[in-house]
Image (cartoon, helix red, strand yellow):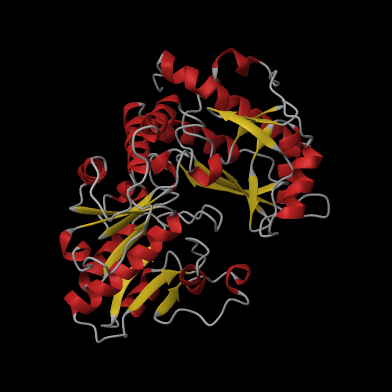
Amino acid sequence: MIRISARSLSRGVVGLRALSTTTPFSSKLSPEQVFEREEKYGAHNYSPLPVALAKAEGIYMWDVTGKRYIDFLAAYSAVNQGHCHPRIVKALQDQAGILSLTSRAFYNDVLGEFQEFVTKLFGYDKVLPMNTGVEGGETACKLARKWAYKVKGVPQNQAKIVFAENNFWGRTLAACSSSSDPSCYTDYGPFMPGFELVPYNDLAALEKSISDPNTAAFMVEPIQGEAGVVVPDAGYLKGVRDLCDKYNVLFIADEVQTGLGRTGRRLCVDHDNVRPDMVVLGKAISGGLYPVSCVLADDQVMLTIKPGEHGSTYGGNPLGAKVAMEALRVLEEEKLSERSAELGKVFLSAMQKLNPNVVELARGKGLMNAIVIKPSDDCNAWKVCLRLRDNGLLAKPTHDHIIRFTPPLVITEDQLQESIGIIKSTVESFA
């Protein structure tokens, strides 16, 4: 049983306001007005669940009418520490009034502190800070190519990077070029050369691909998130590490979604006791308060990039650096990885007992889980999510028939049981 301090408990329940399903807060806008304005003035590149949110704290979110919901998406695992964590908010407020941005044209007194903190925490020589998860992935690919030419000796413009099918690491042209999802790459060609796909969780296919002497790296999610929380076989990541060592290929772990406590360990690769050559972090590294990402690597890889060859105006800014350090301290000091590990077992066990006439499969690790909906005329993942919303819990489908469940890691056991009850009754309503 997890021991939860009074302070941690208050983070989950959000004080007395959490005792009811509504709050005195309300917006001047109606949900319909929110929907209509976004539709009129914004690009139509998302299909949001129809709920108009206006406030969030801990595991809870409120819409413009004051109705309260339990958040079971956590902004795709960006708010592992819970919404508006007071320590992270204070770090942002304090630094914002002192120094927010210098660019990398000058030194500042915060970046080095962050660099020392994060490299010592994760055990790497160097860190290269960026802003978004996809920028972290792009940075890792550039580092891999630099290393291939400068260290491995691959002929110029011949370096190959291998990815797993059904991966997702963003929406840039490079990310689209590595995708096997038509909705991600259709009408965006021509694509980045030098990328190759292999089936996920298939070591034989990986070996065949990376035995090519021009291979620079294999970039992989330890658990595939957008694909539907696809968990590989035990030993897969150890096999990846061994093959990369055998063929002198860099192992890049995309931990943007799986890292930072989400699966029950600081990094998801820690379950297999493997150390990648590069780790890409984002999302929860800043607790949902400010966009921060980074790539961790040792000197042999990181120092292949020289001044002027890669950078970002905002990457490593003092504001983001302070926020990220406090977000990481919260994860460590509130033992959110341990909570995720223990409560994840409770949650997955409950999901595996859902009505099999509606739910075909439940899978996951820690508090990163998904259920696969058995499609029918009356039931699909979207309809289930709409009814979950009506019942006070927010989740989102991925790939039509899968619902991902990733609540903030500050959730308490009582709140988890309440959430399980909502999910169970909602599923039963489709039986």
**In this picture, residue 168 sits left or right of residue 266:** right
Residue 60 visible, this angle: no
Coordinates of residue 271 in the picture (x, y in percent): 33, 46
Name the one closer to the observer, 105 or 224: 105
Residue displayed at 46% across by 54% down: 231
**In this picture, residue 318 sits left or right of residue 64:** left
Coordinates of residue 207 in the picture (x, y in percent): 32, 75
**In this picture, residue 378 sits left or right of residue 279:** right
Quadrant of the frame with the C terminus: top right
Coordinates of residue 83 in the picture (x, y in percent): 52, 32
Residue displayed at 22% across by 65% down: 307
Q: Which residue is situated farthest in the right direction here?
A: 377
425 to 78, vertically: above or below: above
Name the one closer to the observer, 167 or 299: 299
Residue displayed at 44% across by 29% down: 89
Coordinates of residue 125 in the picture (x, y in percent): 17, 53
Quadrant of residue 425 within the rendered picture? top right
